[in-house]
Amino acid sequence: MPDSYDTLATVYDWIVPESLVSPEGSATAFLPYLEELRPGARVLDCAAGTGPLAVGLALQGFDVAATDASAGMLARARALAEARGVDLDARECLWEDLGDQRFAPFDAVLCVGNSLAHAPGGEARRAALQAMGAVLRPGGLLVLTSRNFELLRAAGTGLQVFDHVVVREGRRGVVIYSWWLGEDWEDRHAMDVAVAIIGDDGAVETLGERLAFWPYRHETLDDDLRAAGLEPDTSSFDEDVDRYLVTARRPL
């Protein structure tokens, strides 16, 4: 999986929603869930990708660390932090290895961008959540986002070609997704992510990567959080909504 994400780093910004591409936009989207935090609070983005959320939160005055399984992603996150003039403790790290980093406890941990689904199955998902909870202070907050996999599995294997041109740093591209579902929920599923980049001369360059994911029901996620020693707090899940946000806490 880290190798796949190194390749995905080349197309990552193309598939991030427009509102979340910039550090300011990404921070604005998640600040409402962090209102309880004091200035200078310690925050970990443990699926940091190319860093817009981590850098955005650092610009807001939080003491931010960023981890990701991909060296390619983190290289871009560090470059973004340097360009925006903020300190960012960015480390290549798998979720299950968070405890080995000897971080001081965090007031909040964020795992966003539907990242948790890339843990290979329920046992690995619970281990990842347990590791996130272990680096929280007692009473600390976990924020994660997820696809509504009930909707995805109901729709079945499919193909989506975006109906608009995405512009990133003056370049134009069209994003294409295709996905294959396993027979059972616990089976390995797969998604192809491709970007057809359109040059000024009309030439097309295609970048892409295939990613594995392991879906779960929203009730299963609640069970996983409890099994990992966390207390589910809030959820925006709705059966008709494509994505939702969940918060949980490490018990006092």
Image (tube, rainbow, N blue to C red):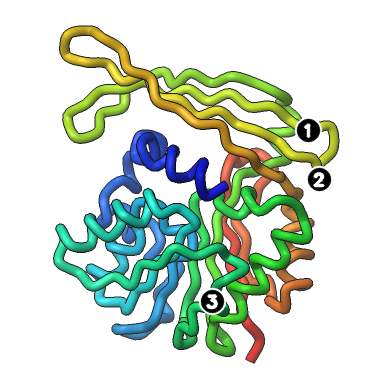
Could you tell me residue 204's position as x and y percent?
31, 12
Where residue 206 appears, as percent x and y from the top left, is: 38, 19
In what element is the residue under mark 1? loop
Discs 3, 1 touching: Cβ within 8 Å: no
Label 3, label 1: how far apart the Cα atoms are: 33 Å
Q: Is residue 40 above or below residue 75?
A: below
Return the x and y of residue 54 as percentages of the image width and height.
Answer: 34, 63
36 vs 73, nearest the viewer: 73
Residue carrying label 2:
186
Q: Name the residue beneath numbered marker 1.
A: 182
- Residue at 73 percent across and 25 percent down: it is 156
Horizontally, residue 140 falls left or right of residue 152, namely left
> From the viewer's perspective, is the residue at label 3 or at label 1 nearer?
1
Q: Secondary structure at mark 2?
A: loop
Tell me the residue that label 3 is attached to: 141
- Give, as a three-letter code, the residue at label 2: Glu
Which element is circle 3 on? strand
Q: Is residue 5 above or below residue 64?
A: above
Above or below, 5 relative to 192: below
Q: Which mark is residue 38?
A: none
Identify the residue at horizontal 35%, vertical 74% (top origin): 64
Residues at circles 2 and 3 in contact by the CB criterion of under 8 Å: no
Figure quadrant of residue 80: bottom left
Q: Is residue 147 left or right of residue 27?
A: right
Q: Which residue: 37% across, 49% down?
A: 72
* Closest to the observer, 109 or 33: 109
Q: Are dots 1 and 2 in contact, CB under 8 Å? A: yes
Chain-order first, disc 3 or disc 1 = 3
Which amino acid type is shown beneath numbered disc 1?
Answer: Gly
